[in-house]
Image (tube, helix red, strand yellow):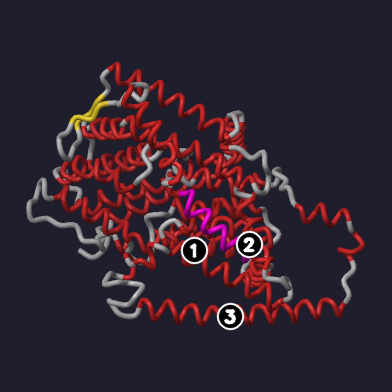
Amino acid sequence: MTSVTERLLSRIEHAGNRLPHPTLLFIWLCGLVLLISGLASALGLSAIHPVNGEQLTAMNLLSAEGAAKILTQTVSNFTGFAPVGTVLIAMLGLGVAERSGLIAVLLSSIVRGARGNLLTFLVVFAGVMSSLAADAGYVVLIPLAALVFKSAGRHPLAGIAAAFAGVSGGYSANLLLGPFDAVLAGISTEAVRLVDPGGEVNIAANYWFMVTSVFLVSALATLVTARWVEPRLVSIEIEDDDKAAAKEKPQEKAVIKKGNEQQEEFNQSRGLKAVALFTLIFAVICASGLAGENAWLRQGMAIISSPFMKGIVVVISIYALLCGYIYGRFSGTWRHSHKLVEAMEGSMATMAGYLVLMFFAAQFVAYFAWSNLGIILAIHGAELLTQLNAPAPLMLVAFILIAATINLFVGSGGAKWALLAPVFIPMLMLVGIAPEITQVAFRIGDSSTNIITPLMPYFGVVLAFAQQYRKDIGIGTIMSMMLPYSVAFLIGWTALLVLWVGMDWPLGVL
């Protein structure tokens, strides 16, 4: 079985890596969407929106109207593309922390306390929980996980894979209620009222199931990492500057005087103490800004929807930048203030290739949205399921697979649910499936395939992080690396739901 799986993943990797450079691929995809939109428009491809009854037709991007959108919105497509600003801001601060030596010292402390499967589990668990901080998991945790694994003597790509599986594959699961719960519950309530005018889906309707899912996803990802992912990564040698430096000066690397070691430990300890003191002050400031409904970081809102949480990436970046600078000065790594500026410039310099990739990725995502092709495909997929007329359990599993497939083409979970809920919630209610169960089924399908579709905006981000360790890594490598997680999540999560429903356990607070 292992050999069959290995051959399949190798073929996927080989086929995917035969694709052109990711930037060129997105350029070609932009051209392909333009051509398909023209053909779809000529053929009259359309669908009826299930909510408002509006007829959606494929837009011809080769028309005068399409050309006008392309010419006038190319700049805003790029500057407004979510992964661009968040990644650059996060890397600005994290780059300072890394180049000052702070991250290396902290990571060495972490790996001394957690190794092997425990380290993997903690990384995935942190990734799952990161959904509370919007996109912070993608831009903060994934590169940090690579460094953590590397510090532990493990392959950094395994760290990227485990973190990506938690952040994106386990996106719906959490120990706390978040904005996504509120969005889904609101849409589900509107769909329920198409059948039951007084019906409502509570924001915590899936809470118990999702709390359990946190540990299920973390355990599955830990197993997949150890059983399938890391063994395959042995053949991928990373481009390690540290190894090159060691070969150039073997004697200097091999012999370290005891006095220097003691001085280094003293300097690191002094730097860490300064960072710890600053962290305490920073935490007090944040806590004071969140204490009370009218506090300056809440402005009358719940903490989960406050300016603080909406700007959590900025908060993390500022914190990391200041910590890096403080550590550099107190540990003696940086003796001059201009090192701070050099660290920020160096961090941004490494993002040049990423920016080029994101420019064309942003255009492709915009073109695909303008063409209406994704929405039309989603609606027709929903209609296909309604025609199956299968038993209720089979309908539920089929819906998970439909949601997982649609997720390969349409990114936004809220947008997909707004399209699917008005069709599937009433339909499945009529065959005895509660709307809370349908909502959970959607969440399983929507999360499980996030990690294998290049159309997901942050897929390019993960690819860019991986290429920092080996420049020739392609889309195929990432897809083959993440496919075992996706399959495991689909099977394991679906089995948990079938068991949960079969035992008639409450999904959440009704």
Left or right, 401 with respect to 255, comes to left
**Extreme right residue here?**
251
Query: Where 266 falls versus 205 (above or below)?
Result: below
Comparing 441 with 69, the one in front is: 69
The disc label shown at residue 126, or none = 1
Crowding at label 1, few (<14), some or many (≥20) Cα neighbours within 10 Å?
some
**Magenta stretch?**
83-98
Instruction: Say whether residue 505 is visible.
Output: no
Q: How many marks?
A: 3
Q: Residue at x 40, y 31 (%)?
A: 71
Judge depth for marks 1 and 3 and give the one in front: 3
Residue 37 in the image: x percent, y percent? 36, 24
Task: Specify the amino acid type for callout 3.
Answer: Ala
Residue 509 in the image: x percent, y percent? 23, 65
Q: Which residue is mark 3?
A: 276
Counting residues from the start of the chain, the first of labels 1 and 3 encountered is 1
Quarter of the rendering containing residue 60: top left
Comparing 370 with 417, the one in front is: 370
Judge depth for marks 2 and 3 and give the one in front: 3
Q: Residue at x 45, y 42 (%)?
A: 78
Check if mark 2's residue and mark 3's residue have beta carbons within 8 Å.
no
Query: Where 369 falls versus 90 (above or below)?
Result: above
Measure how far apart labels 2 and 3 are at the Cα level: 20 Å
Quadrant location, the C terminus: bottom left
Crowding at label 2, few (<14), some or many (≥20) Cα neighbours within 10 Å?
many
Instruction: Say whether residue 132 is visible.
Output: yes
Counting residues from the start of the chain, the first of labels 1 and 2 encountered is 1
Query: Where 303 falls versus 190 (above or below)?
Result: below
Q: Main secondary structure of the magenta part?
A: helix
Q: Which residue is mark 2?
A: 148
